[in-house]
Image: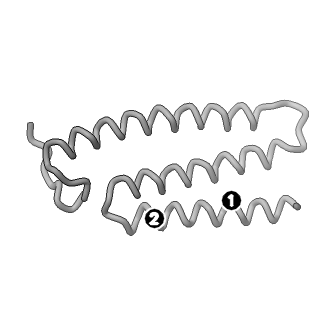
Amino acid sequence: MTTEHLLILSAFVFCIGLFISLTKQNSIFILIGIELMLNAANVNFVIFSQNEPSLQGQMAAIFIMVIAAAETAVALAILFKIYRHYQTSDLKEVNELKG
């Protein structure tokens, strides 16, 4: 595969993630969309670092994966707490965050 094909694939995955994040009201789907966008950025890092002898792109991709895993863990903990309080994960129904 050429670089152009991989960049088109990455842009397609990013657009799918952006579409999901903007159109869905369910918080789990929004997190899935954000993860897709982060994975598209990782693919770009790896593509652009293919021709370099250093591993900077791969290291950046691993760093993004670690940050995404931590972000997902924190976001899911918050969502579980919101679900326990409001009995829904729909973001339109959760309009105020009073304790």
Residue at the location (80% across, 47% down)?
48
Q: In the rendered structure, are the residues bearing label 2 and label 1 in contact, judged by CB atoms less than 8 Å apart?
A: no
Q: Is residue 77 found left or right of 29 in the rendered image?
A: left
Q: Is residue 38 left or right of residue 24?
A: right
Q: Classify the position of the C terminus by image quarter.
A: top left
Q: Quadrant of residue 14?
A: bottom right
Residue 61 spot, x, y in % from top left: 67, 38
Numbered disc 1: secondary structure:
helix
Q: Characterize the local packing of mark 2: few (<14), some (14-19) or many (20 or more) Cα atoms within 10 angstroms.
A: many
Taking the image as shown, residue 95 lies to the left or right of residue 74, namely: left
- Of label 2 and label 1, which has the lower sequence position? 1
Whole-angstrom CA distance, mark 2 to mark 1, is 15 Å
User: Which residue is found at the position 88% from the left and 38% from the top?
Assistant: 52
Q: Residue at x 47, y 32 (%)?
A: 70
- Residue neighbourhood size for the residue with mark 1, other residues' Cα within 10 Å, grouped as few (<14), some (14–19), many (≥20): many
Q: Mark 2 falls on what kind of element?
A: helix
Mark 1 — residue?
10
Query: What residue would you read off at disc 2?
Result: 20
